[in-house]
Amino acid sequence: MLRQFTAVARPATLRTATRTFATSAIRMAEGDTGAPRGTSDAFTKREKAAEDYAIRQREKEKLMQLKQKLKEQQAHLEQLSQHIDELTKDQGGEKN
């Protein structure tokens, strides 16, 4: 049910002269481009693609660093194994 409010009796010229328009600023979050929710414009798609590419590149760099560390660790283990073999040769035994 709608309520009807009656205006205070004022002359018509006074009412129109003092009336102001109420406007509100459009509030957007950081990064919003003004496209309606659920749809995306070309800028949003391009920005997402650039972010995804940058993330993939960082992950690729991290994987390369991990692979390098793994190679170094394997080389170190191989050196330790050779060192142990050298030490056990001098001791003799069934296996040597």
Image: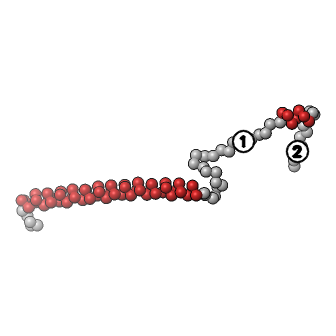
Identify the residue at horizontal 74%, vertical 41% (top origin).
23
Identify the residue at horizontal 8%, vertical 61% (top origin).
89
Question: Residue 85: x, y in percent?
Answer: 13, 61
Question: Residue 54: x, y in percent?
Answer: 45, 54
Cα gap from disc 1 to disc 2, whole angstroms: 24 Å
Identify the residue at horizontal 88%, vertical 44% (top origin).
3
> On screen, 77 above or below 15?
below
Tag 1: amino acid:
Ser
* Residue 3, label in figure: 2
Question: Is 76 left or right of 48, judged from the image as shown?
Answer: left
| Residue toward you, 80 or 37 | 37
Q: Quadrant of residue 4?
A: top right
Question: Residue 77: x, y in percent?
Answer: 21, 58
Residue 8: in sight, yes or no? no
Q: Residues within 10 Å of mark 1 (few under 14, many from 20)?
A: few
Question: Residue 26: x, y in percent?
Answer: 68, 45
Residue 7: in sight, yes or no? yes
Q: Secondary structure at mark 2?
A: loop
Tag 2: amino acid:
Arg
Q: Quadrant of residue 42?
A: bottom right
Q: Which residue is mark 1?
A: 24
